[in-house]
Image (cartoon, helix red, strand yellow):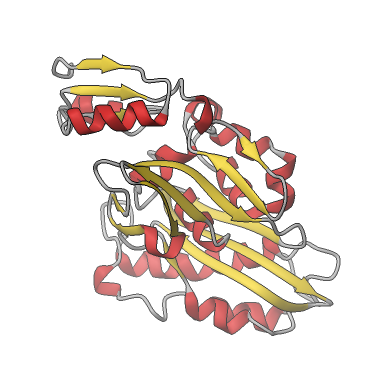
Amino acid sequence: MYPDEFDYERPQTVEAALDLQVDHPEAEILAGGHSLLPTMKSGLASPDMLIDISDIDSLQGIDADGDTVSVGALTTYATIADSASMQERATVFAEAAHAVGDVQVRNRGTVGGNLAHADPASDLPAAALAADATMVVQGPDGERRVDADDFFFGMYATDVAEDELLTRVEFPARPEATGAYAKKPSPSSGYAMVGVAVALTVDSGRVEDVGVAANGIMDHGVRLDPVEEALAGTTLDDDAIEAAAAKADADLDEMMMMDDLQASAEFRAQLLERYVERAIREAATGPDAIAGAGSP
């Protein structure tokens, strides 16, 4: 199917893009296009204008100076996955970026597009939660910062207003942390039936800091607080990992879990426990991270 006719603009600055959004409230933002273009072809979206932000230099790249790692919204998955700075300072997010799609998708798709679109089965929301990311949003009144925990509202719904743009994502630099993203991909699409992100800071086998979150299980990425609480302060051995994984769905309402042709809510809950355990074990790779734990 062909999309309806539309106008096309390619602003060079964030401010110009925001002005176009004000003048054209039915417009859509075009970045990598992996989410928008299929909906236009299917008729689910019919914007009167595409605002192509791909030429805005300020939205590109990684700045890893100081205690914060800043990632521009137009930075591609491949750039994140291949970045030594991200692997060292925000490991869990780099691991999740590497799990997105295939080589072609990773070379074109953008971090900002993924997070702002907020597909419940996409890979980056859980990693943003586990890494304690902050989303920087810009609108007519300037910039504001939103913690990842407050950013995702529901299916395809975030705290980005219609007259705003997600411009960058900031991560606390944690070179002492390890991270992993374990995913059960859909055999038809590659999206996450269940995906679990874990960030761990461990000293002499004891967990000092932990972030655990999941995709694909609810209508948006969710932090798994009971798992974090079960791991915090423990000696990271087999018993601790299994006990924490058993709490994976403790705070989740099974009636609200994703339930579709690919997997029932009950099956997703079973998958979640297994993938929480797998992700914890994969994250526990430092020399002092794990005491006596078996292989995944």
The quadrant in which residue 177 appears is bottom right
Question: Where does residue 35 sit, x and y in percent of width and height?
Answer: 33, 34
Q: Which residue is drawn at 63% across and 63% down?
A: 199
- The residue lying at 68 percent from left, 62 percent from top is 283
Q: Which residue is drawn at 40% across and 69% down?
A: 269
User: Which residue is depicted at the point 49% across and 26% down?
Assistant: 108
Residue 205 sits above or below residue 121 on the image: below
Total numbered badges shown on the rendered structure: 0
Quadrant of the rendered structure where residue 236 is? bottom right
Q: Which residue of the protein is positioned furthest toward the front in this rendering?
A: 141
The quarter of the rendered structure image containing the C terminus is bottom right
Quarter of the figure that contains the N terminus: top left
Residue 186, horizontal then vertical, whole percent? 41, 46
- Which residue occupies the foreground of this view, 137 or 50? 137
Q: In which quarter of the image is residue 175?
A: bottom right
Q: In this view, does 232 lie above or below 7?
A: below
Q: Where is residue 237 in the image (x, y as percent from the top left)?
A: 73, 79
Side of 29 where 96 appears, left or right: right
- In the figure, 86 relative to 175: above or below? above
Q: Can residue 165 be seen in this view?
A: yes
Image check: 31 left or right of 82?
Answer: left
**Residue 138: percent from the left, percent from the top?**
39, 43
Residue 243 visible within the image:
no
Q: Is residue 188 left or right of residue 199?
A: left
Left or right of residue 73, residue 231 in this image: right
Of 144 and 84, the residue lying toward us: 144
